[in-house]
Image (cartoon, rainbow, N blue to C red):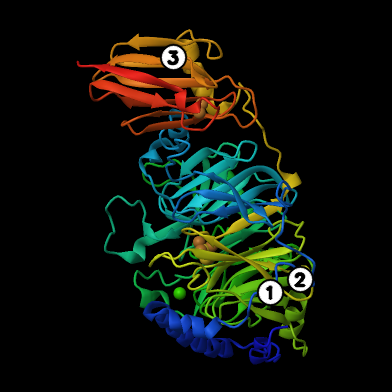
Amino acid sequence: MSDNHQDDKPTGSGVVPVNQGRRRFLAGSAMVGAAGMAGVTGVAGVGALTRSQPAKAASNGNGLSTHVAPGELDEYYGFWSGGHSGEVRVYGVPSMREIMRIPVFNHCSASGWGMTNESKRIMGDSHRFTNGDAHHPHISYTDGSHDGRYLFINDKANTRVARIRLDVFKTDAMVTVPNVQAIHGLRLQKAPRTGYVFANGEYMIPQPNDGRDINDPSKYYTMWNAIDADTMEVKWQVIVDGNLDNMDADYAGKYCAATCYNSEGAVDLAGKMRADRDWVTVFSIERIEQAVADGNYTTIGDSDVPVVDGRKSSDLNVTRYVPVPKNPHGLNTSTDGKYFIAAGKLSPTVTMIEISRLDDLFEGNLEDERDVVAAEPEIGLGPLHTTFDGRGNAYTTVFIDSQVVKWNMEDAVRNYNGEDVEYIRQKLDVHYQPGHNHATLSESKDADGKYLFSLNKFSKDRFLPVGPLHPENDQMIDISGEEMVLLHDTPTFAEPHDAVIIRRDQITTKQIWERDDPYFADTVAMAREDGITLESDNEIIRDGNKVRVYMTSVAPNFGITEIPVKVGDEVTVTITNLDRVEDLTHGFCVVDHGVTMEISPQQTASITFTADKPGVFWYYCNWFCHALHMEMVGRLLVEPA
Ligand code: CUK
Ligand code: CUA
Ligand code: CA
């Protein structure tokens, strides 16, 4: 155990009365201010607090190592959210080799995502946005285990949810959620399967947000949203009191719980910290579905999505509000399915809500909503997120203390019930200021307790300096033994908030595309209407000022090397890559036109642009494919109008 464990020994005093919790909060609050100052005024303050432990060698007593020999494959896939880069990144764990990037809410210069017709169809109307803010990646489930079919992720910046196919590692669906702003917390139904994607709207807004009530924040509301995971349509929304931050679902398919840090409904910082307590909002999926089936809903504005009233004033009883210390943040379901664990943020505690007591809570059998609290252990300053090892231990990041704290859940419950037991197992310094953490398979019932990542918001002095903007630092920790051991630092660019890591055997990919893939089915249909057989034809079709170019590619040749058009023509180039060789991707890039796309083996891809200036413009293949790759070119010949 680390030395600082001794300094933070919990009191072991049993049940924590409300007023004591408040005193603890106030102490914590002061520290928030202090740490905030250090973060703003300079590097010295933060470093002095936390810089202590030299990294140990990459292999250690627990026996785990980051080393994966050249040519060997990693044991796990790790999917990292790319934060406000808008993308998802794929790492091999434990080597932390970056294997792939998946563009989602961003536009991608390499693959043409956001520019090709196929990606525009998937992004829909929202493809006009070139930014996103992806926080919470989660992989679909069957019976509480990951089934490796899809990954879903939120976009806080432009209120979207996207789905990624894990057979081809491409985004295949995207939806903008109505009536809310800034999708933040996102989780999947874990059992019996992922039928729903649940999504929190973080900010409260007028309903409808059409210019009314701008100056009356008392009329602002947000909603909890359910999206059909198969169709990616928004099924229903639940209007709530307060806001919604993070969330998780149970392992039975019955309940979800979300943290609310703005029960005050305030629009200023001081106002959001005014109440002594905020709450965790608990949702009964059954009761919401029943309300929708019974027609007990309204619709708002232009949207026809059913909106169920889950506010405290409603008699539908689809929600419950469990008071917790003020301004909570993370919410994680323990992998044994027993607890929703809400991290205190401004309180040094986490609140363990016992899921088996929620039936009674909804039936009205409990005297007080707080009766569902199984324990409220004190962890350290600034608890944000919790992960699990499948052996009864929880690991909570504490932002202000810059530590990952390992604690035992059943010992915390015994302590809360008055027994004099120690529940903190170890506090490990991380570098620096951790947000999420995530252990291998730790959001499924298969948590294997091997590798844990602490996604640290500040890297400060851990890497070669690169100017004022620093990378984040995602640290890998071996949790396979009694003691946590730091293994590896990974610099990451703006800005992973969360990750999900599953075994490599849980994902099955395609090595080349199948010709009937739905990803480009609309383009295939367009070709059929033009009488084109994509697998063989090289033809140019004129239709007024629209020019449709159909060609094949076989390394190192484009099927068409001259495209004659006139200024003002709208040109659609559709390319089918006939190569069947694994890894033989071609590209299509028209110089000086901002036109680029990827065409992988057996894929059809298309892109539309306007020939807006006369002259000769070369197009070339931009994925290195052959010894004569440089020669794989053609000319766009643009005559004056
Ligand atoms: S949030 Cu970023 S550290 Cu969006 Cu899950 Cu907590
Ligand atoms: Cu085809 Cu490079
Ligand atoms: Ca608050």
Above or below: residue 193 compared with residue 560: below
Asked which secondary structure carries label 3, the reply is loop
Mark 3 to mark 2 CA distance (whole Å): 58 Å
Residue 291 in sight in this render: no
SS assignment at label 1: loop
Report the residue that reaches farthest toward the left.
Answer: 641
Residue under the image location 57 percent in, 61 percent down: 247
Where disc 2 sits, the SS reads loop
The residue where tag 3 is placed is 560
Q: Which mark is residue 60?
A: 2
Nearest the viewer among 524 and 53 is: 53
Could you tell me residue 67's position as x and y percent?
A: 71, 59
Residue shown at the point (49%, 88%) measured from the top left:
26
Callout 2 amino acid:
Asn
Q: Amino acid at mark 1?
A: Lys
**How many residues crowd around disc 2 within 10 Å: few (fewer than 14), some, or many (20 or more)?**
few
Decide if ligand 1 comes within 8 Å of the CB at mark 2: no
**Dot 3: within a 10 Å radius of its alpha carbon, few (fewer than 14), some, or many (20 or more) residues?**
some
The answer to which image quadrant residue 393 occupies is: bottom right
Q: Are marks 3 and 1 in contact (CB under 8 Å)?
A: no
Between marks 3 and 1, how big is the CA–CA gap? 58 Å
Circle 1 Cα neighbour tier, 10 Å, few/some/many (<14 / 14–19 / ≥20): few
Report how many numbered discs are placed on residues in the image.
3
The quadrant of the picture occupied by the C terminus is top left
Name the residue carrying label 1.
56
Image vertical order of residue 589 relative to residue 422, above or below: above
Residue for point 64% across, 23% down: 580
Three-letter code for the amino acid on which mark 3 is drawn: Ile
Asked if marks 1 and 2 touch (Cβ < 8 Å), the reply is yes
In front here: 289 or 566?
Answer: 566
